[in-house]
Image (cartoon, rainbow, N blue to C red):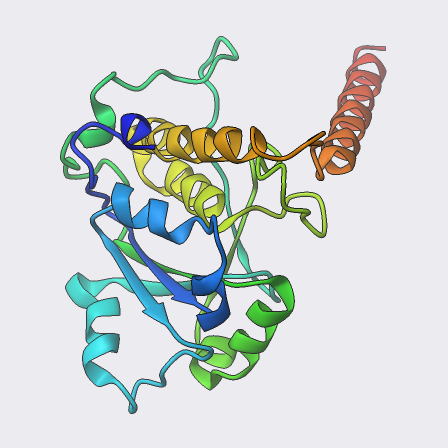
């Protein structure tokens, strides 16, 4: 995988990424947290089945809020903010980032607003739910954000429970795409390249490998087609 790691890794980001990794997830082969550790500098990893409360580990919480950062839990919930990627250019194409944007330093004003700390829960879906529920600070005190994925999961040999569910690395990549301004696309690409190579290498060892998430891809395509059809009908109606 070394050949697919981004040049200049680990890369700097304005957003701080925190992973709460379930102890059993550490024991699983082919998790994505180790790849993130190789790719990102502004990354904090904590292995535990619950998040420490502020009075239990004030030094750790100070790191989360360093530099005036506001903390957000990446998890669905009431009032969760949607993290959407930048809009396409006026010609309908995505704006291209410079080739060296992934390892360029962040410029002032590149990503407006106070810097954020994003907290991701890394574990199987039932584990992740329990990890959130065991922390009063995570469950009740933090504002939440949800991702608006630009593509379905490429974790082909691991089944996702629903459309839009991603591996931890894919989720981090989508969050950085939404938050890191002009560098977002290059950062996402820099994370996805070693991830895709890892999946490709693993699939080469699986006899008669198939994409366990193909049903979700098909469902997403049908949903997009319905939305496009509805937009066409609305346009025709408006022009009538």
Picture layout, residue 108 above or below residue 29: above
Q: Is residue 86 left or right of residue 35?
A: right
Which of the pair 47/44 is nearer the observer?
47
- At horizontal 40% and vertical 76% (from top left) the residue drawn is 48
Would you say residue 59 is visible in this rendering?
yes
Residue at image location 78% in from the left, 32% down from the top: 223
Residue 118 falls in which quadrant of the image?
Answer: bottom left
Q: Is residue 129 above or below residue 43?
A: below
Q: Position of residue 4 (x, y in %)?
A: 32, 27
Where in the figure is residue 78, as x and y percent of width and height? 62, 67
Q: Which of 226/47 is in front? A: 47
Q: Where residue 65 appears, x then y in whole percent?
A: 23, 68
Number of numbered callouts drawn:
0
Looking at the image, which residue sits at the far bottom? 55
Residue 150 located left or right of residue 196: right
Q: Position of residue 127 (x, y in %)?
A: 58, 71
Q: Can you say which quadrant of the picture contains the C terminus? A: top right
Toward the viewer: 223 or 168?
168
Q: Is residue 86 visible?
A: no
Query: Relative to 137, does residue 234 appear above or below in the rendering?
Result: above
| Residue at horizontal 43 percent and vertical 81 percent from the top | 137
Q: Please state, as top left, top right, bottom left or bottom right, where the N terminus lies in the image.
A: top left
Establish if 157 lies above or below 217: below
């Amino acid at each position: 995988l070394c050949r697919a790691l981004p040049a200049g890794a680990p890369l700097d980001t304005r957003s701080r990424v925190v992973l709460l990794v379930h102890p059993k997830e550490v024991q699983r082969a082919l998790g994505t947290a180790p790849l993130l550790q190789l790719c990102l500098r502004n990354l904090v990893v904590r292995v535990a089945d619950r998040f420490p409360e502020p009075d239990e580990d004030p030094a750790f919480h100070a790191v989360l809020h360093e530099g005036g950062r506001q903390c957000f839990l990446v998890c669905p919930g009431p009032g969760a903010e949607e993290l959407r990627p930048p809009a396409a250019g006026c010609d309908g194409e995505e704006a291209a980032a410079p080739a060296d944007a992934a390892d360029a330093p962040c410029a002032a004003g590149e990503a407006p607003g106070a810097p954020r700390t994003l907290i991701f829960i890394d574990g199987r879906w039932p584990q992740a739910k329990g990890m959130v529920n065991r922390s009063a600070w995570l469950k009740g005190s933090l504002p939440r954000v949800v991702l608006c994925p630009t593509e379905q999961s490429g974790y082909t040999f691991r089944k996702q429970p629903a459309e839009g569910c991603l591996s931890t690395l894919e989720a981090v990549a989508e969050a950085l795409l939404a938050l890191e301004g002009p560098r977002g696309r290059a950062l996402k690409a820099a994370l996805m390249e070693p991830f895709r190579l890892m999946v490709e290498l693993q699939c080469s060892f699986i006899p008669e490998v198939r994409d366990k998430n193909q049903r979700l891809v098909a469902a997403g395509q049908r949903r997009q087609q319905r939305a496009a059809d509805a937009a066409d009908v609305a346009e025709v109606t408006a022009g009538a």
